[in-house]
Image: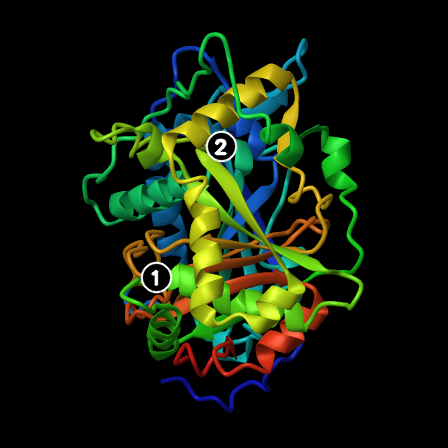
Amino acid sequence: MEDHNDAPLHTKLQVKFTNKSIVKPTNPSLEPRILHLSNLDLLSGRFPITYFYFYRRPTTDASAVILEALKTSLAETLNHYNPFAGKILPNSITNEPEIICDDSGALFVEAEANLRLNALNFHDLDDPLKGKLVTVNPDFALQIQITSYACGGISITFTFDHALGDASAFGKFLLAWSEIARGKPISTIPDHRRNILPRSPPIYHPNLDKTMVKCTMEDIMNIPTLKKLIKRLYHVDRTSIDRLQSLASSGGVRRTKIEAFSAYVWRIMVSAMEAEHSTCKMGWLVDGRSRLGGDRNYMSDYIGNVLSVAFGEASVEELKRNSLPEIASVVHEAISKATNEAHFLDLIDWIECHRPGLMLSRNVLGLGGPALVVSSGRRFPVAELDFGFGGPVLGTVGSTVERIGVSYLNQRPSAKGDGSWTISAILEPQLAAALELDSVFRPMTAGILEL
């Protein structure tokens, strides 16, 4: 345990950037190849996605040795993930983004923070996301920032362009890097083919015309946000999760943990909404790999985007009146509409009929009224991300994007591996206040992380 008296809690975080370098694959390609995005990649919106990992002071090597080892292992990892070392540029004819696999490299930033890890405000992510612990340079598809702290602890932030892939793809990359850093063979051979193709001729359910919209980067940059969204981090312990699952299950029907959690949050959400809204939406990110891969699940190692978002809608009155099992049934029904092959084939075909361009759910673009999207990352590697100097005390996801059309709750397993969750949230202030009045949501602290 570290001495908690060495630094006052929540002193202003200051970060000094000490070095920037470009890490390239050790085995460069003979000639650049162009990776054309699949239809489902065009749903990504080109948002930067950031993952944060915090580590206690390494007991073995000095920081210079660790930095060199991270660069060396990253260069080797990029041999397997060549697109991550490329550039993402618009096609001159269609203006759609494409990945130029030219080995231009990933940006590797080194920095020093003025605080000890136990003096960080882990609850409020707004401050560290603003140019302190996250580097966002649009010239690089992948950027990493290693920040050292006054106590000798380390944070690693990884920022990916969403065109490279989704959480499943990024999780496989991070795990491969950690395996290579520890001298182990990689557990997944990545599939970079981007071979998600439409049917011929493309056909789709007409409902997609009501839920999806073609958009431009300008539309995305100007998403209407009525209120400033805030970014927060919460801890939810296993006891609370198990209790919610028990409360949401009835009549012999057992709900999943994420269904129970969603139902509980949905009810809190309506209590924090303004009176002028009569309905409220909740969405769930759904991975299509197992739906499109069939029984053989040949898409399990696919690197790219294979995501859809399923939305459910209910009246405010129903959400206030109904029991938790009844709300959990609405959640289950909404998610079920997207967890099948037909939904993904229709989505791929809808995009084909509306190319060229970027596509988004109308709700994600902020055109569908109040909505909260829940993302389950129960398979995302957290405790496993040991780069040779021990496992993390915290691993989570964040966003540097300022304008987002919906609120988000991103769930990740706790680094403790004890069944508890870390929830990274992008919320309207009223909803954040309502969650923090609730005993299930504990604002993340250095104490919870045992720093």
Relative to 53, does residue 337 appear above or below in the rendering? above
Q: Which residue in the protein does label 2 denote?
A: 164
Depth check: 376 or 309 in front? 309
Q: Secondary structure at mark 2?
A: helix
Residue 320: image location, x then y, percent: 60, 71
Residue 149 shows in the view: no
Q: Give neighbour class at mark 1: few <14, some 14-19, many 20+ (Cα, 10 Å).
A: many
Q: Which residue in the protein does label 1 denote?
A: 255
Please identify the quadrant where the N terminus is shown: bottom left
- Dividing the picture into quadrants, the one containing residue 173 is top left
Depth check: 346 or 430 in front? 346
Please name the residue shown 63% across and 76% down the image.
434
> Farthest residue toward the bottom?
5
Residue 42: image location, x then y, percent: 57, 27
Looking at the rendered image, the disc whose residue lies closer to the viewer, 1 or 2, is 1
Q: Which mark is residue 80?
A: none
What kind of residue is marked 2? Leu
Residue 351: image location, x then y, percent: 57, 22
Relative to 451, does residue 283 appear above or below in the rendering? above
Residue 187: image location, x then y, percent: 21, 40
- Dividing the picture into quadrants, the one containing residue 261 is bottom left
